Image: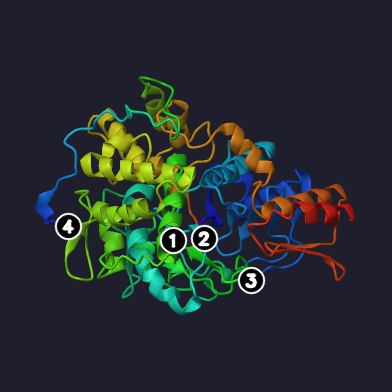
Amino acid sequence: MDKRIFGIETEFGCLVSDDSAGTAESIVEKVKDHAFLKDKLGLIDLHARDYAFEPARCGGFLRSGGRLYIDAVGSHMEYATPECTDFADAVAYDKAGRVILQRLLRELDLQDKVSFHSNSVDHFGGHTFGCHENFLVAIDDRFFLEALSYLLPFLVTRQIFAGVGRVGGHRLNYKSLKNNIMTISDYEVDYQWVGNFYGVESDPTVEFQLSQRADHIVKTISSRVRFNRAIINPKWDSYYNYSNLHRLHILFGECNMSEYATLLKIGTTSIVLDLIEDGILLPDVELRDPLEALKSVSRDQSWKWLVKRKNGDTIPAVDLQRMYLNAAKERYTGRDAQTDHILVEWEYCLDNLEKDPYLLATKLDWVAKRKMMEDFIDSENGAVQWGDDILHSLDLEYHNVNPETSLYYGLEQAGQIERATTDRRIFEATMMPPSNTRAKGRGIVIDKLLANNSRDYVIDWDLIYINKRQHLELKNPFNTYVDEASSFASGL
Amino acid sequence: MPVTDDDRSTRPSAPADPLRKEGDETGPSKPDVERPDRSDLLKRMKRVDPDQARRYRQRSGE
């Protein structure tokens, strides 16, 4: 596919440092209401999108075309980028969500009492929550599952550059809840649709691993997302579908703080999907046990990252990635600037991961975080060791969206992390939709409905409905619908 | 080409200079600080509440 639609969804953890601010559940409600009712960042949903998980008024579409809402399961504040088709846009819109949340905390004077963290794990509570990617793919239903088997090895091993890094580990236990650290059944909604259950234990044998989510992934493909978390959720019932194109929903991803890592993650995944759509099915990439490989790569303290292929051979994850890279270089070099850029950086990363991962400390989250932890341990002259609580807290602080305290933003402010976008571009992405997808048309109508103080609308990814005679279809995500939306808005 | 465990050791013996020397004009910009001072970052790390990860109690999401 020459052009592809993609987007990123992120669930944020909420840390309440001062109980006078209220519970995390009450704070996300305040933040969401402030965004839509006071700041008018978008239009709050007047109708339930899902009665259990996305009831009416739990959030809404933003002027940027993305969404901000509370996921009822887990009560996490969640942000979804608008539909993007440029890799660089995905980076800017992804970061814009964090800027919006921090701004809302500041306006509510909560910035010293509450923080949002774009990590994916509760170290001491055993819970996980996600950052998911959506890609529009042109894969026929009949071959969908087969095609995914060629994607899985890529997704399993891309954590060597896309992993955010994690201090410690979790172990899942299906046999006994004796050492379970995960609280259960406090909230009825959290356990709807749960057909599987296990206990989570802390795993003291792991100092540091590449991924925050690998320990919690138990399926390769599944439509259940809690306790049956998969690498891929096929989302057959997709809002994103268009014509013969489907939404591929990747569950095994993490919210990168590094813009460079986000760019590489989205760019390489899109290019690998190009290969699969073009029928370039690499026969030697299939893994004997993708789930085992997912965990072993994440936890490999030697950084050799060896995985076993279906044919029985063992191969380093770097070399497995090179098989995709070489096929992509052969076919897509010179196609367009953003593809060329990703191919160059992909190769650069693989070369350096093989040579010395620390060479990527200014680019990749897991390397930057690992180096930061080592510097801290050194500075404490033996008083701090792997496994100590402080390292888990530093890990969490890396992901704080508050630039004044976040360790990631500390790196950025010191010029020690490479940027892939600019603050100006991120600021624009908080308010303005991408110029080349249907989000543009959606944004035009949302602006007009906000100006009219309208209280009667239904907005979805592919439709804006006012009443039976006034609705605007946005079926084609590649179309900006500027003329149609402007005409529609003028009649409101 | 498959390799055995001993063919390659990627673990460095010591951290290397993390700054990429050769620039790619079309790529992301290089850090604009030649020799960044990490002491401010270390100060920031030492201000982190050691117990905050224990207080960060979340619920399972997707």
Three-letter amino acid code at the position of disc 4: Met
Is A386 situated above or below A67? above
Q: Which residue lies under the disc numbered 2?
A: A135
Quadrant of the snapshot with the C terminus of chain A: bottom right
Q: Position of residue A61 (x, y in %)?
A: 70, 55
Of labels 2 and 3, earlier in sequence is 3
Q: Which residue lies under the disc numbered 3?
A: A52
Q: Position of residue A402 (x, y in %)?
A: 54, 37
User: On the picture, is A303 further left or further right than A490?
Assistant: left
Mark 4 touches mark 1? (CB < 8 Å): no
Q: Check disc 1 and report its element: helix, strand or loop.
A: helix
Q: Which mark is residue B1?
A: 4
Mark 1 touches mark 3? (CB < 8 Å): no
Three-letter amino acid code at the position of disc 1: Leu
The quarter of the picture where residue A369 lies is top left
Which chain letter goes with mark 1? A
Depth check, front residue: A9 or A176: A9
Q: Residue furthest right?
A: A491
Q: CA distance from mark 4 to mark 3?
A: 50 Å
Q: Position of residue A91 (x, y in %)?
A: 52, 44
Please tell me if label 1 and label 3 are on a single chain.
Answer: yes
Which chain letter goes with mark 2? A
